[in-house]
Image (cartoon, rainbow, N blue to C red):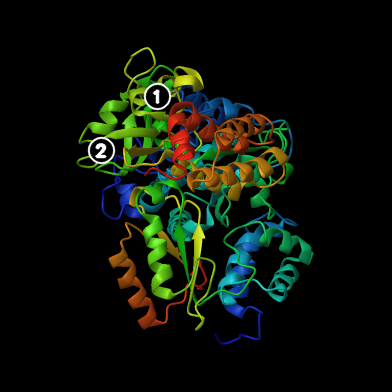
């Protein structure tokens, strides 16, 4: 990869301090924008860049900004989604902990573009130690004139605050996040209206993921076109991949989109291969929600083309033989992994995290957990396997928010690709692992 | 466990709460509910009693029911008493792949309690939790606002010994 965009300076000691960040060219994008750009020009650069939402949905960021209602007299809000909770995903913490000013600079740029005067970073409550780091960085930014009244004499003013969650995966869904930020239960809202029209406190709001926001300073400094020159197809730029499981080098890697999956897993630059003496069995490529793929289908598409780390390539073949880039939570499993047991932990997770508003999700996730528990502990029947598929189909698409789909896809895909392993549990009346 | 009879915040904590309330527009002080519940829980032995929640409601000028419905939604809030040091063990997929079950069993054996229980001396509670977003360093546990990553049974023993010696509490104001 030519140049790192997000993690370029991540190993520099003291990067979390204003002084070091500034010395490395930090906040130059804010200076540039406040001197030379109208808010719409900022949005235009982001649109040109082709940057897509890095929280998992991959929606074009510039287009999302473009939906904001600028006609009302109501205040507008820019909110950072730092509720990183999707199993397998641990990239945002890396930025928040080591490079908080990059996030803050991105928040200033986004807020300026959207016309927000107050912005919030909503961070999951478990990461209070990261919240404290960000709050310290925010205080430094105020002290140095990059936040507060009349920033750099431009006439533009912005207040930025951190808000903790309290242990609810669902608050990563943007409307649930806004409810939570209003001090309520994290129940997703019915859309439309979308937050760009009716968001925080009923006002126009844009919610973006940490990684999306952290890419903004580079895009402004180098131009949207330079960003869109990186990557492949409609997968522009770089992406953080958090890799975990049975690999030699778990960690957070910045890749240029389009990198072959095989290179990502086996190259020493990235995961460094499967742990010694073991072989690749399966991968969940984009956080626990996305369909699991067996080794052959994650390395190559059904047509035999090399699979690439990009939105398009990972989803090639639809859910029959493909998956999704999602949040970039890359979970690698070797041959010692019991697919049923791993799936059981995911089912338990979604059951625990369902907000309970929609009955297909509230009831269905619990049924799936119970049935998977039954199969894993040796009491399942062959009918249970079909029952799981049936329940997953009745959840998918029938809920207010995507948590229902997120709970259904892992179950459906595990049975699609590893049905014989479920059957073996039933035949042996125990877990074969 | 010493019972603190006075659930009201001291001046310093009230200043912090008032500073937080100012982060939101006028009339939107309910937005401070989650931050204030975190503080209230930490200052009241790690759990939220009805009295504590009523006090929080009065601080934010909202109905107690608005506090109850929020406190019962979020898994970080404990509505029952807990031990002085709550050990939260992640059990989700990526941690499971790296041996979290063994870590949980080890804590359970060493402390003689099951997940969800508190030791008779009130010192420790074990809680299982869902993904803590540190999967690259699995298995992971959380104690208060600390993460302990790449856990082994040996590391677990060392931590327990240290916590025993220092009479560890996980209930400290997370903002400080």
Q: Return the residue nearer the eye: B54 or A104.
A: B54
Quarter of the image that includes the C terminus of chain A: top left
- Residue B168 visible? The answer is yes
- Badge 1, how many Cα within 10 Å: few under 14, some, many 20+? many
- Residue B112 is labelled as none
Q: Quadrant of residue A228?
A: top left
Establish if A218 lies above or below A308.
below
Percent coordinates x, y for residue A330 in the rendering: 38, 37
Question: What residue sits right under mark 1 in the picture?
Answer: A310
User: Which label sits in the foreground, 2 or 1?
Assistant: 2
Q: Is residue B13 above or below residue A262?
A: below
Tag 2 and tag 1 share a subunit? yes
**Of A394 and A384, which appears nearest the observer?**
A384
Q: Residue at x 46, y 76 (%)?
A: B169
Camera-side residue of A79 and A394: A394
**Residue at the extreme top of the image, as rendered:** A303
Q: Earlier in the sequence, mark 2 or mark 1?
A: 2
Q: Is residue A41 left or right of residue A185?
A: left
- In the rendered image, residue A308, in percent from the top left (x then y), is placed at 35, 22
Q: Is residue A17 left or right of residue A183?
A: left
CA gap between label 2 and label 1 equals 22 Å
Q: Position of residue A211 (x, y in %)?
A: 44, 39
Task: Please name whichever residue, A238 or B145, is drawn nearer the observer in this view of the structure.
Answer: B145
Report helix, strand or loop for mark 2: loop
User: Dot 2, crowdedness within 10 Å: few (<14), some or many (≥20)?
Assistant: many
| In contact (CB < 8 Å): disc 2 and disc 1 | no
Callout 1: SS:
loop
Residue position for label 2 = A274
Q: Residue at x 39, y 56 (%)?
A: B100
Task: Specify whether residue B19 is in view.
Answer: no
The spot of residue A201 in percent (x, y) is: 72, 46
Q: Residue at x 37, y 66 (%)?
A: B106
């Amino acid at each position: 990869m030519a140049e790192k965009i997000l993690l370029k300076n991540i190993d520099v000691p003291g990067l979390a301090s204003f002084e070091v960040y500034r010395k490395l060219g930090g906040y130059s994008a804010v200076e540039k924008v406040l001197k030379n750009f109208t808010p719409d020009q900022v949005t235009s650069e982001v649109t040109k860049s082709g940057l897509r939402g890095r929280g998992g949905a991959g929606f074009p960021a510039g287009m999302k900004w473009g939906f904001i209602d600028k006609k009302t007299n109501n205040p507008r809000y820019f909110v950072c989604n730092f509720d990183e909770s999707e199993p397998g995903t641990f990239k945002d913490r890396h930025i928040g902990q080591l490079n908080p000013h990059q996030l803050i600079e991105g928040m200033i740029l986004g807020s300026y573009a959207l016309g927000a005067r107050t912005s919030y970073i909503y961070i999951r409550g478990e990461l209070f130690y990261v919240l404290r780091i960000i709050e310290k960085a925010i205080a430094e930014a105020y002290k140095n004139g990059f936040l507060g009244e009349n920033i750099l004499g431009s006439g533009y003013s912005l207040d930025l605050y951190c808000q903790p969650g309290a242990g609810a995966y669902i608050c990563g869904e943007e409307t649930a996040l806004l409810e939570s930020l209003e001090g309520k239960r994290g129940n997703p809202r019915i859309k439309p209206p979308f937050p760009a029209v009716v968001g925080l406190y009923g006002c126009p709001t844009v919610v973006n993921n940490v990684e999306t926001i952290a890419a903004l300073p580079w895009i402004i400094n180098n131009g949207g076109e330079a960003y869109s020159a990186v990557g492949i197809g409609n997968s522009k730029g770089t992406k953080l991949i958090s890799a975990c499981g049975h690999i030699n080098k778990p960690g957070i890697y910045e890749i240029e989109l389009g990198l072959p999956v095989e290179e990502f897993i086996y190259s020493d630059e990235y995961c460094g291969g499967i742990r010694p003496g073991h072989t690749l069995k399966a991968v969940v490529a984009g956080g626990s929600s996305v369909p699991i793929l067996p080794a052959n289908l994650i390395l190559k598409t059904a047509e035999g083309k090399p699979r690439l780390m990009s939105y398009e390539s990972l989803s090639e073949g639809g859910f029959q033989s493909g998956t999704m880039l999602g949040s970039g939570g890359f979970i690698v499993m070797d041959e010692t992994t019991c697919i049923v047991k791993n799936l059981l932990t995911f089912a338990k997770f979604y059951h625990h995290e369902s907000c309970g508003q929609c009955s297909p999700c509230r009831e269905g996730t619990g049924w799936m957990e119970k049935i998977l528990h039954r199969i894993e502990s040796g009491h399942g029947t062959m009918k249970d396997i079909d029952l799981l598929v049936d329940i997953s189909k009745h959840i998918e698409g029938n809920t207010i928010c995507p948590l229902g789909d997120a709970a259904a896809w892992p179950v459906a895909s595990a049975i699609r690709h590893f049905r014989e392993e479920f059957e073996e549990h039933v035949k042996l009346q125990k877990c074969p692992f | 466990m010493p019972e603190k009879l006075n659930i009201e915040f001291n001046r310093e904590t009230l200043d912090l709460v008032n500073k937080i309330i100012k982060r939101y527009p006028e009339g939107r002080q309910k937005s401070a509910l989650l931050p204030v519940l975190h503080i209230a829980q930490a200052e009241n032995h790690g759990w939220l009693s009805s009295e504590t929640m009523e006090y929080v409601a009065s601080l934010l000028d909202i109905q107690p029911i608005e506090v109850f419905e929020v406190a019962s939604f979020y898994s970080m809030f404990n509505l029952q008493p807990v031990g002085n040091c709550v050990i939260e063990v992640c059990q989700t997929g990526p941690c499971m792949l790296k041996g979290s079950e063994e870590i949980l069993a080890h804590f359970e054996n060493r402390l003689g309690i099951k997940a969800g229980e508190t030791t008779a001396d009130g010192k420790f509670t074990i809680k299982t939790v869902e993904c803590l977003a540190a999967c690259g360093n699995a298995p992971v546990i959380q104690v208060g606002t600390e993460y302990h990553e790449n856990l082994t049974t040996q590391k677990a023993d060392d931590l327990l010994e240290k916590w025993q010696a220092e009479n560890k509490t996980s209930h400290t104001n997370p903002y400080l």
